[in-house]
Image (cartoon, rainbow, N blue to C red):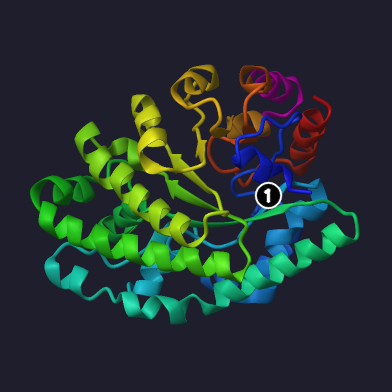
Amino acid sequence: MTKKILRVLNGEAVWPPPVWLMRQAGRFLPEYRAVRATTAGFMDLCTTPEKAAEVTLQPVRRFGMDAAILFSDILVLPWALGQELRFAEGEGPILPPIRDAAGVAALDTTRVRGAIRPILETVRLVRAALDERQREGEGEATLIGFAGSPFTVACYMIEGGGSKEFVHVREMAHGQPELFAELMDKLVKATITYLSAQILAGAEAVMLFDSWSGILSPRLFRIHVIEATAKIVTALRSRFPGVPVIGFPRLAGLMLGEYAAGTGVQGVAIDTSTDPSQAATMIPANMALQGNLDPLALVAGGEALASEAASILEALKGRPHIFNLGHGILPHTNPEHVAQLVSQIRAA
């Protein structure tokens, strides 16, 4: 029998909807913190297959989630291309900024296949564990692979880390369009390689995270979000026609419908600020919507969480829907609140 999430991504309205949460493998779980304490750093965890597989599986075991999302990071790709990457405690990712032609030229797409080998081994280990759980009657979780979308990854590569405005990124996109296009072209090719390898290793669906797509003007959104995503989806669908792609154009706003129509994705994840009822009018009725609970409602728990979740369930009942957050789970979330949410959805 086809797994629930794959049924939804094929256009079926499953009730109650399947559920998983962005960043569900992470710091809010004590068992994750225990594994993390045994590593030399975040990238060490990402590139140690046995440990990365363990933390990927933890939320499936604890909560019975309908998906396991590969434990990794969107910035694995620039690292695989040869850009230095480190994670400073309390600061987030730090990369040497790429601001000129020499920096773009130094990125080597031939490095990617070798660099990602540990991550692909994680995928294989997780898929084997999920298959075993299914054989033992312990659930039918779908393994979701992922990558950062080229524009969002470019944001960190150019800026040198996180930012509120990503000024240097937007300056390059407007003022040096040829250079920016060259960087995006390398990222599109590398993303196709990366996601294809994850699928071959066992991923049953893949997701593209475009966390900063909403900072672009509509014109640049069409070029660097819609067109770039369409190239990736077209390449993946030609090789793996049965493997669905979920796109997350965070803060897309009124561009959401155009994104759904122009990219070829089978599912669209919506952020917390998007009204799910309005999103449902912008997206074809047979296309899956994923989301979009506020992570702070999950932190609050209790009646606040129950009310928010009920509102989303009601808004999207009768159409293909994967219940999720509108952004990643927060580190100070109480695991009991996650259990409350999953129980509410199962009982819907």
Q: Quadrant of residue 325?
A: top right
Q: Position of residue 261 (x, y in %)?
A: 39, 34
Q: Is residue 210 visible?
A: yes
* Residue at horizontal 54 percent and vertical 25 percent from the top: 285
Please say if 110 is above or below 210. Answer: below
Image quadrant holding the C terminus, namely top right
Q: Horizontal placement of 214 versus 39: left or right?
A: left
Amino acid residing under circle 1: Phe
Q: Residue at x 74, y 39 (%)?
A: 338
**Predominant SS along the magenta part:** helix
Tell me which segment is drawn in magenta. 299-311
261 vs 126, nearest the viewer: 261
- Is 148 inside the magenta-drawn segment? no
Label 1 sits on residue: 28
Residue at 32% x, 72% y is 83
Q: Residue at x 25, y 61 (%)?
A: 185
Q: Magenta stretch: residue 302 in it?
A: yes
Image: 36 above or below 149: below
* Farthest-out residue, left: 175
* Image coordinates for residue 310, horizontal then vertical, percent: 70, 20
